[in-house]
């Protein structure tokens, strides 16, 4: 599984209400957008609907842009439609999960410490990023994948959201920090695995990853360089034989909206072939 989501977080602190985006926040804004639209008594139903559609896109885009600027990430205007489409179609219950086989589970006092899983061979849409800061790389990579998911592909259709979104990271030679190179990856839905739609963005590559055994531990909250290094250290201490896993390559799996305040994540160790 050789491969290199996106909480918008960084060094700038934002108030809780303005600094985080949750899927529920966006859904609520979508529901409310009609009440803010001016009604033109002389206009047609179609014209009013179009005005409401434009207003919804602008409101969602402005919200994402406001949060992102606080964390040194720019959200371009062309993201308006993908953000709207993913918001409408991205409810958790509608997201397809990457299939795996649970091999074993390590528990202590009723708490799951980690799981050993087998993931099968599968195709993923991957984008390599190398921004100055880790948070910038995963945010920008995820936005590119959003455009691929939301019709910017050879089929011209919405592909459907799958979880988790994976980010492959590498530690430096001293194993005290992360390198700048990461890969953000989206699992191609099951019904498209045989013949995945091709991305219009040439930076996105469809890769077939081999079957892989991973050791997975769940954690919540921010996914930044500091928290990732802490989770790597913790799982290494819990594993009975960490030397059986790759020592410089790890995966962060994100299950909830990339900017959610209480993001659900996992750290994955990859078993050596």
Image (cartoon, rainbow, N blue to C red):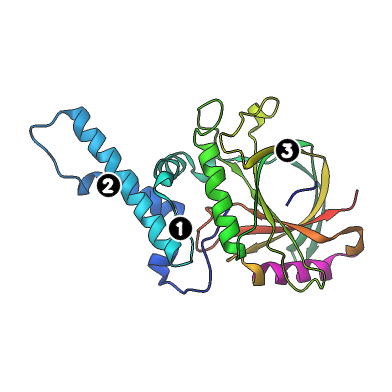
Q: Quadrant of residue 187?
A: top right
Q: Nearer the viewer, residue 128 or 262?
A: 128
Q: Relative to 110, is 90 above or below?
A: above
Pinpoint residue 111: horizontal percent, then vertical percent.
73, 64
| Dot 3 crowding, Cα within 10 Å, few <14, some 14–19, many 20+ | some
Magenta stretch encompasses residue 237: yes
Pinpoint residue 227: horizontal percent, then vertical percent.
65, 70
Q: Quadrant of residue 126?
A: top right
Would you say 81 lies left or right of 178 here? left
Residue designated by label 1: 74
Magenta region, residue range: 227-240
Magenta stretch encompasses residue 72: no
| Dot 2 crowding, Cα within 10 Å, few <14, some 14–19, many 20+ | some
- Mark 2 or mark 1: name the one nearer the start of the chain: 2
Residue designated by label 2: 33
Callout 3 secondary element: strand
| Residue 118 visible to the viewer | yes
Q: Nearer the viewer, residue 148 or 15?
A: 148
Residue designated by label 3: 207
Q: Relative to 238, is 41 above or below?
A: above
């Amino acid at each position: 599984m050789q491969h290199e989501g996106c909480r918008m977080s960084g060094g700038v602190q934002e108030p809780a209400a303005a600094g985080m985006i949750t899927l529920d926040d966006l859904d609520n804004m979508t529901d409310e957008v009609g009440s803010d639209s001016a009604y033109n008594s002389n206009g047609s139903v179609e014209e009013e609907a179009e005005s409401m559609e434009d207003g919804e896109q602008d409101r969602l885009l402005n919200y994402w842009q406001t949060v992102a600027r606080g964390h040194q990430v720019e959200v371009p205007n062309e993201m308006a439609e993908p953000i709207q489409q993913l918001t409408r179609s991205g409810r958790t219950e509608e997201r397809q999960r990457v299939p795996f086989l649970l091999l074993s589970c390590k528990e202590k006092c009723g708490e799951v410490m980690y799981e050993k899983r087998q993931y099968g061979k599968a195709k993923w849409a991957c984008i390599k990023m190398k921004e100055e800061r880790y948070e910038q790389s995963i945010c920008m990579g995820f936005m590119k994948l959003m455009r691929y998911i939301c019709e910017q592909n050879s089929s011209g259709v919405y592909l459907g959201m799958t979880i988790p979104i994976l980010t492959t990271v590498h530690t430096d030679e001293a194993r005290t920090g992360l390198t700048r190179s990461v890969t953000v990856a989206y699992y191609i839905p099951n019904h498209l695995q045989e013949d995945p739609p091709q991305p219009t963005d040439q930076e996105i590559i469809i890769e077939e990853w081999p079957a892989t055994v991973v050791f997975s531990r769940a954690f919540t909250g921010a996914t930044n360089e500091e928290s990732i290094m802490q989770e790597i250290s913790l799982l290494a201490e819990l594993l009975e034989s960490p030397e059986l896993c790759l020592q410089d390559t790890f995966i962060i799996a994100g299950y909830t909206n990339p900017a959610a305040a209480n993001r659900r994540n996992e750290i994955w160790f990859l078993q050596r072939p």
